[in-house]
Image (cartoon, rainbow, N blue to C red):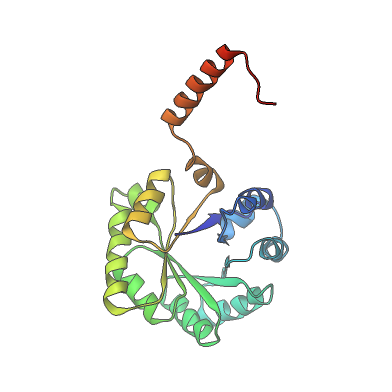
Amino acid sequence: MKFFVDTAEIDAIAELNALGMVDGVTTNPSLIAKSGRNILEVTKEICALVDGPVSAEVVATKADDMIAEGRKLAEIADNIAIKVPLTWDGLKACKTFSDEGRMVNVTLCFSPNQALIAAKAGATFISPFIGRLDDIHLDGMDLIADIREIYDNYGFETQILAASIRTPNHVAQSARIGADVITAPPAVIKALASHPLTDKGLAAFMADWEKTGQTIL
């Protein structure tokens, strides 16, 4: 499974990238706003830092404007994935970008039918939002499983990018179902290394070692 980090914070990306935990990056208007930086400037810096796809999102709502914005974003670097919303206009833009040989991340997916038509429009990535479905008392993992089954049934090459990841459990479940990619905030990715029994075991080891009075160095 590939790990994308969902942030526009350069230091956080660099820390995870140094450990081999970054296969790509996803950004959106909210994350850009949170960073307080210019979208073109920060996206260029991210693209220089990581080798994998960097999703940069259009903000227009009409297809022609999305296409113009997407082409502008694509000029930043070769590893830009243009991010468009799963609307009819977004699908029109997706088809145009796909035909031009560009990577496209179709975002805000909440149903299997949406994922199906995004794949037919040539999406490189489909981003189903797990956490937001959980928020309205639906199981986001059911959507991941449905998309996996549909794509496997027909050989679609669109990669399932599990998004709106809130917990380490979301990551494990997505991996079991067969999502191709997860994108998660840095804190969630770092939390994958944590377990209370690990902490308890380490504390016991250290207490026993201290009793020996020995040192290694």
Residue located at (54% from left, 21% from top): 206
Q: How many callouts does the rendering have?
A: 0
Residue located at (56% from left, 53% from top): 21
**Above or below — where is 146 with respect to 82?**
above
As drawn, which residue projects farthest toward the bottom?
99
Q: Position of residue 127 (x, y in %)?
A: 43, 64
Relative side of 61 to 43, left or right: left
Q: Position of residue 78 (x, y in %)?
A: 65, 75
Q: Nearer the viewer, residue 199 or 69?
A: 199
Residue located at (41% from left, 81% from top): 121
Q: Nearer the viewer, residue 109 or 184?
A: 184
Q: Quadrant of the N terminus?
A: bottom left
Q: Position of residue 69 (x, y in %)?
A: 61, 76
Q: Residue 117: name its quadrant.
A: bottom left
Residue located at (51% from left, 87% from top): 99
**Above or below — where is 204 with respect to 133?**
above
Q: Position of residue 186 (x, y in %)?
A: 56, 47
